[in-house]
Amino acid sequence: MRVIIFFFILIMPLSAHSRPVVAVLPFEEANTDWLSEGMAWSLSDKLRRVSALQMVDSNRLNAALSQYQTPVQIGQSAGATLVLYGACRLQKDQLQVSARVLRVDTDDILELGEVEGPLDSLFALQDSVIRRFLDGVDLSSTVIEWEAIIRRPTRSVQAYIHWVRARSMLTGNAEDPDVVRGHLTLALAEDADYADAHSHLGLLFVAQRRFKEALGALQTAVRLKPDDPLTRYNLGVTYASLGQPDRAAVSFQDAIRLKPDDPITHYNLGILYHLQGNHEAAIAPLQTAVRLKSDFAVAYLTLGIALANTQSHTRAEDALKEAIRLSPENADAHYNLGVVYIEMGHRDQAAEVLEQAISHNPEHADAHFNLGRAYEALGRYDEAVAAFKQAAQFNPDYADLHFNLGIAHTEAGRFEEAIRTLHTARRIYPQDPLIYHNMGIAYRNAARFEEAENAFREALRLNPHLADIHLSLGSLQLDMGRYEQGLSSIREAVRLTPKNADAHRYLGEALAYLKQYPDAIQAFRKAIELKGDDGDAHLGLGMVYLQAGQKTAAASALKTGLRLSSGHPDSLAIAREIARLQKQPEQVSTYLNRARAFEDAGLLDEAIDAYRKAASLSPENADIQHALGLACLRANRPEDALPAFRKVLRLRPDHPDANLIRDFIRRMEEGR
């Protein structure tokens, strides 16, 4: 082998303590179709082994090469401090290589001259260029990796040529993978232990989604060249695609150990953990990815999703905002930020961001769905319905969509439409108890009580441990006048969720219906202990105190309840009752106690007179009118009962005995 060097090299000194960032450009070529990129790849691979140097990011270099022409422009765009480039010529099996170094900050060029030798001496010529480069930048004396630098990739130059041609086709997204495979097969025929050929054969199989074949090729490449981070990376991709995430993680970690500054590998390790549901583990590699590559928009997006899944909503918001800044038209980034805002309770911001997501991708079904959720939370039910219907056009079999659409219809008062929509959700997912629960709520609001009860019971059959469904069933049973059953259902809800304030409030209502006032008072007090600002619990407690004859306590509880329940539909009647109780707190109770004593003694006429006195002092009290009507019936004075019962319905249309009272009034009016 004869290598001729035609020059002596002047030294291009570097500033102290600097670590040069090197870009190697494709060499200009003549008479070959493979050497330009092959020379650049091989020189880059050798320089990558020099710890005193740092190679530019390959993606950034490729972007610069596609955009600029001159070495200065390319180097500046790629972030290089030194650019190695040159030309090569193959003529009659003789190879000539010339090279030069550009210092980007000063625009100085150092000519490395020309080396020449037979084609079989290609690897030695490359080593000579590397030595001259290191001499030229005054680093030769610091290099300790010479053995690794001069290591031959293969024992056959012909194998190398086939590999370069195959790699060029892979890099250029060759349309004919069989040609690529043919070159790699020829390379391996020349040298069966050619690690790079095995590695790129594996990469070809990965691109074709032939992962089992890729696995064998990449494992061989790792065995032959264990220090190649790219092969380790592609092995990780292969393991992940074969459903072996633990091995994939190990391969990605090995690649990171060999090349810790590669953001893509950190990103894929984070994605792997994220897809496994291990969001905590995903955060660190994703943070490293964006630290290494500050414009890595998709990594910021994935980081934001992982943070959101760990309930780190503020940090997720920051990551997703950065993803949007880097990629303003990324619908998924807007969508995920909208979901984070929903979880944070920022409903107006959620709606705004989700509308932007849809503007970038009008067919984003999830964005339409979550926009509906945001509108629903804002009480904009008609807009929520429209958003859910739009989502259904793109994903008609999504049960949650129909479920939320049904809830929106219910909130908007369109109960029959809600029922139809929830039936659609049930057909898609018949085992979801929450669908039946909300179906029961819609039936109840539509006054279809038996169907509501059936829906609640089916929900409990699917999951008997959901306290809210027991509460809904119990409340319905109270409305149907089945107080004992209602009490039983509500007690089960309390047992399942003993710290649920609503459950204790419903328990108080059930006990009050059954006139178990001491227990009802205790239940309402427990509800208030758990949720002190529950106006309905204070009002319920006040009404029980009233029924128990504790007028002062009743007035205090009703006053608190009225203050906490601004806009209550019965606020005027409650205020009047409070005023009467505070003015004459004992007179009403005196007449009521007297009336009950007369009833117990069988003196019904006297009892009726006492009830009438009590009613005159508290004319808005439906319970007194009800007691008066019952006393009249017991005294066989139905005509006197009639006006009392009519007042009951006027004052309290949802009275537990409302159906019986209506039936009595109808019979009286018919003369029966």
Image: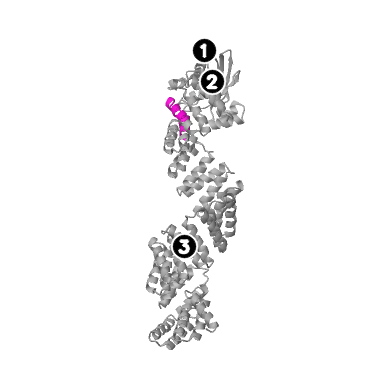
**Residue 293: assigned label:** none
**Residue 161: assigned label:** 2
Q: Are dots 3 and 2 in contact, CB under 8 Å?
A: no
Comparing 75 with 90, the one in front is 90
Is 638 placed above or below 412 here? below
Q: Position of residue 545 (x, y in %)?
A: 41, 75
Instruction: Name the residue that disc number 3 marks.
Output: 456
Q: Main secondary structure of the magenta part?
A: helix
**Visible residue check, residue 298:** yes
Q: Residue furthest top?
A: 2
Q: Is residue 430 magenta?
A: no
Query: Which region of the structure is painted magenta?
Result: 216-236
* Mark 3: secondary structure: helix
Q: Nearer the viewer, mark 1 or mark 2?
A: 2
Sequence-wise first label, 3 or 2: 2
Which kind of residue does numbered mark 3 sit on? Phe
Q: What residue do we see at 51% from left, 11% from top?
A: 2
Is 585 placed above or below 15 here? below
Instruction: Name the residue that disc number 1 marks.
Output: 3
Q: CA distance from mark 1 to mark 3?
A: 90 Å
The number of numbered badges drawn on the structure is 3
Which kind of residue does numbered mark 2 sit on? Ile
Comparing 449 with 579, the one in front is 449
